[in-house]
Amino acid sequence: MSETRATVVAFIGLGHMGAPMAANLVRAGVDVRGVDLSAEAVEHARALGVPIAESGAAAVAEADVAITMLPVGRHVLAAYTGGETGVGLLAAARPGTLFIECSTIAVDDARRAHELALAAGHRNVDAPVSGGVMGAEAATLAFMVGGDDADVAEARPLLDLMGRRVVHCGGPGLGQAAKVCNNMILGVSMIAVSEAFVLGEKLGLSHEALFEVAANASGQCWALTTNCPVPGPVPGSPANNEYRPGFAGALMAKDLDLAAQAIAATGVHAEAGILAAEIYRRFAAGEGAMMDFSGIITEIRERSDGGAAA
C-alpha cells in the first residue's frame, strides 16, 4: 500500500465512469490530478474529492501513471499526441510514465496507442472495464488488461483500488479484444432475454413466472438475473427506475459497432453479433441512446404489432 500511496496519478476523463474511479483512488490515499474538458464534469469530480489539474499536460508532467477514460479511440489518440490542439500527453509526461488506457476503443486503436507510447519512451497497457457506473462507484469493476507482464503488474495495485477483478488477457490490445467479445455476448443475450419476456407477455405468462423458471434453468444469464429488462424480479435493475442507465444504449451501440468492426477485420461468420449491432444502432438513434441498454425491450414491444406489457 505504501508504494500505491506514493504514486502520483493523472486521471484524464472525468465523466460518468472516470469521476467515481478517480474518487476511489483519492479515497484510497492516491495522489490524483484529474482533468476533463467539460466544466460540468470537473465540478462533479471536484465534489467527489478529486483534485483538478490545469490541463492534461500539467497533470502528466508530475505523474508516475496516467489513466485515460475517454469516449472513443480518436479521443485517446488525440490526447496522446496533442492532435492539432497543442502538447499531447506523451510529450508532456516524464520518461517511462505508465499509461493505463481504460476507455473502450477498437483493438487497432489500442495497439496504436501502445506503439505511440513506446515510441515516446513510455509504457502502456489497455485496461477497459466492465461493471458500469454502479461498479465504478462501488469499486467493483472488472478490468480486462492487455500488455507486458511487468507493466500489468505495476498497474494492478491501482486497478485493484477501482475494481474487484483484474484479468491479464495477453499482450497489447487483448484487453480490448476481451471487452469487445464480452459485450457482444451481453448485447446478444439482452436482446434474447427481452424478446423472451415480450413473447411471454403475448402468451399470457407473468414476468415473475418466466423469471423464476429461466433464472433457475438453462436461460440463466447476467442480462436476466442482474439487469433484468422488466420491473419486479430484480429490484435493483434499471427497469425499476424508468430505464435510467446503468449502461446506456448509446454505449452498447458503440461497443457492438466495435465488435462488428472486429468481425469484419477477422472474417468471422458472426451473424448474431452483426444483427445485435444493427438492432442497438437503431435503438440508440432515438430516445434509447440515453436509456439503459435493457430498455431495448421497449422497442421490441413497439415492433410487436403495438403490443403492450401484460
Image (spheres, rainbow, N blue to C red):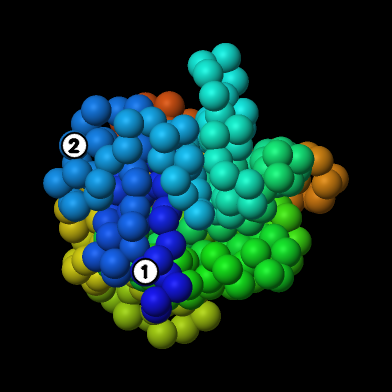
Tell me what residue is drawn at x 56 percent, y 57 percent.
127
Q: Would you say 10 lies left or right of 279 here? A: left
Residue reaching furthest to the top: 84
Question: The residue under label 2 is which amino acid type?
Answer: Glu
Real-space CA distance between mark 1 and mark 2, rounded to the nearest whole angstrom: 24 Å
Label number found at residue 216: none
Check disc 2 and report its element: helix, strand or loop: helix
The crowding category of the residue bearing disc 1, from other C-alpha atoms within 10 Å (few below 14, some 14 to 19, many at least 20), is: some
Rendered position, 5 above or below 231: below
Report the residue marked by disc 2: 43
Report the residue marked by disc 1: 5
User: Which numbered mark, 1 or 2, is in the foreground of this view?
Assistant: 1
Which of the two residues, 201 or 41, is positioned nearer the viewer here?
41
Q: Would you say 128 lies left or right of 44 here? A: right
Question: The residue under label 1 is which amino acid type?
Answer: Arg
Residue 196 seen in the current view? no
Tell me what residue is drawn at x 44 percent, y 46 percent.
62
Rendered position, 208 above or below 175: below
Which of the two residues, 184 or 95, is positioned nearer the viewer here?
95
The crowding category of the residue bearing disc 2, from other C-alpha atoms within 10 Å (few below 14, some 14 to 19, many at least 20), is: some
Q: Quadrant of the N terminus?
A: bottom left
Question: Residue 38: image x %, image y %?
Answer: 30, 28
The image quarter containing residue 201 is: bottom left
Question: Residue 285: image x %, image y %?
Answer: 43, 27
Q: Would you say 197 lies left or right of 257 here? A: left
Check disc 1 and report its element: helix, strand or loop: helix
Q: Quadrant of the C terminus?
A: bottom left
**Sequence order check, earlier mark of 1 and 2:** 1
Question: Residue 29: image x %, image y %?
Answer: 29, 67
Rendered position, 196 above or below 42: below
Residue 150 seen in the current view? yes
